[in-house]
Amino acid sequence: MKYLIKNATLVNENEISQSDVLIEEELISLVEQHIENPGDAIEIDAKGLYLLPGIIDDQVHFREPGLTHKGDIYNEAKAAVAGGVTSYMEQPNTNPPAITCEELEKKYTRASECSLANYSFCMGTTNSNIDEILKVDFSKVAALKMFMGSSTGNMLVDNKQTLEEIFSKVKALIITHCEDDVMIKENQKRIIEEYGEDIPAYFHPIIRNDEACYSSSSYAVALAKKHNTRLHVFHISSAKELSLFTNKIPLKEKRITAEACIHHLWLAMKIIKQKGIS
């Protein structure tokens, strides 16, 4: 099959342009301002529409194995493709978690059987699996995922000696979930003592507050700078954390980067209270 997309507003490689795109045998064969139909191409008029490359989602939780009542690789990958996401990186906090090479390989095998999108999976960390981590071929694995705040099972990494060892020995991308677990537990205890066990949702940013996030993020950044580790901090959630990162270095040269979740930018506290979300 051939497809000719006409008159699209193409967004690609930091540029926006009016372009036609010819697709042959499932591959993009030509991108030009004006392309004549070769005669056998299905033509799609994209005037007034944006055409973007397939999106890469670097943080998905597909919940397979062990938690497939929430989602599985086939259905979640199908939903991703429907939304324009053609590649994903899945996280290790499943049941059992991907904290050994054997469990990680099981995910790759399952995805090869059923995933409708391109895929990679992250190796997980614990306070005691450094030997398994050092066996991983990171040329075939998206990254090492580290929970510096509580997660499923025993995946919290809070031992300072372990953190030093991982940041110094792992020659691959480390991605982190950064929250200071001690501070969070202290905040939660205080809120429960005052308001009881049934805590409304609007207490979430009070329990997991700016200070808890910054404490953990700044520690991760300090370790990365110390050992020249490639670090990416997932879903930063406070303006204070932005001070840890710089825009003075070209992106391709950065060793330390971060991101925010789009949905975190929209769910404001006043909406939570208005909707009565609990």
Image (spheres, grey):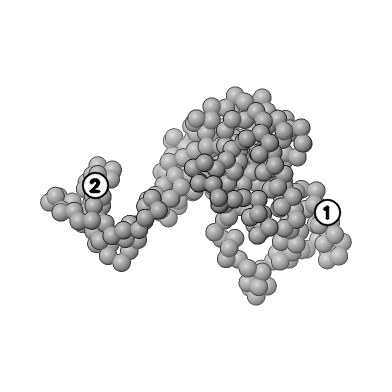
Which residue type does callout 1 highlight? Glu
Name the residue at 57% across, 56% down.
261
Q: Can residue 5 be seen in this view?
A: no
Q: Nearer the viewer, mark 2 or mark 1?
A: 2
Q: Give the distance between the C-alpha atoms of the residues marked 2 and 1, in whole angstroms.
A: 58 Å
Q: In this view, does 39 lie above or below 92?
A: below
Name the one closer to the observer, 13 or 106. Answer: 13
Residue 55: where, in percent of width, then height? 43, 50
234 vs 88, left or right, is right
Q: Residue furthest right?
A: 193
Dot placed on the residue nearer the N-terminal end, 2 or 1: 2
Q: Is residue 13 above or below residue 223?
A: below
Count up the numbered dots. Answer: 2
- State the image quarter where residue 45 is shown: bottom left
Q: Residues within 10 Å of mark 2 (few under 14, many from 20)?
A: few
Name the residue at 62% across, 26% down.
134
Residue 32: where, in percent of width, then height? 23, 52
192 vs 210, left or right, is right
Q: Residues within 10 Å of mark 1 (few under 14, many from 20)?
A: few
Residue where numbered disc 1 is placed: 186
8 vs 153, left or right, is left
146 vs 211, left or right, is left
Q: Is mark 2 on a helix, strand or loop?
A: strand
Residue 30: where, in percent of width, then height? 24, 47
Q: Is mark 1 on a helix, strand or loop?
A: helix
Name the residue at 59% across, 38% down.
230
Residue where numbered disc 2 is placed: 30
Asked if marks 2 and 1 touch (Cβ < 8 Å), the reply is no
